[in-house]
Amino acid sequence: MTIVKNHHGFMTVASQVGNGTEFKVYLPAILTSEHKSAVSSASPHGSGEWILLADDEDAIREATKTMLEAYGYQVLTASNGIEAIALYTQHQDDIQIALMNIMMPVMDGATAIRTLQAINPQLKIVATSGLTTHETLAEMGIQVDHCLLKPFTAPELLFALQQLKA
């Protein structure tokens, strides 16, 4: 529900005994040509940097990977924290930034972040979440370089990555 509200959308619920419940989610989805050109021309590009992307939602993971590759990044993907750590240990000489969702099954992002930081304290980490803020992570004792609240836009992610590269 938080993601729906943050996207200026709304949800309806209709329930009938014996028939079940129907949820409808409404989100604004108009992207004008002005917005498209602003995203492509103003957003910073990568220079072949390797990013470890961990998110349990297939659609988000694949869309983010595709967008990052279109902007010049090389991306390794994981669907949970254990996969992320395994990929990092195999490619730690290549990966410069980890983009970690906080809420994931098997091993959550918070635990995975702590483990990655134990392996390499200099690894740049961007946390993503629909609920967790930078302040909440700090209260949990997790320090990250940047925190993006879902849903985030391509320019927000690209500018966050650019700041980490500077």
Image (tube, rainbow, N blue to C red):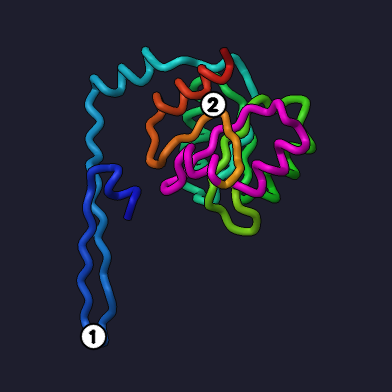
Q: Quadrant of the N terminus?
A: bottom left
Tell me the residue that label 1 is attached to: 17
Q: CA distance from mark 2 to mark 1?
A: 48 Å
Q: Which residue is mark 2?
A: 69
Label 2 crowd (10 A; few <14 / some 14-19 / many >=20): some
Q: Crowding at label 1, few (<14), some or many (≥20) Cα neighbours within 10 Å? A: few
The answer to whether residue 2 is left or right of residue 32 is right
Coordinates of residue 70 in the picture (x, y in percent): 49, 24
- Amino acid at the residue labelled 1: Val
Judge left or right: residue 39 versus residue 53: left
Q: Which residue lies at the image location 71% right of the left edge and 39% below the top edge? A: 116
| Residue in view at x 78 percent, y 26 percent | 93
Quadrant that contains the C terminus: top right
**Toward which corner of the image does residue 74 lie, by quadrant?**
top right
The picture places residue 150, in percent across and down from the top left corner, at 40, 41
**Foreground of the two, 74 or 157:** 157
Q: Which residues are magenta?
A: 110-139
Q: Can you give x and y, in whole percent of width and height, for residue 85 in the image?
A: 72, 43
- Give SS at disc 2: helix
Identify the amino acid type marked 2.
Answer: Glu
Image x and y of residue 15, in percent:
22, 76
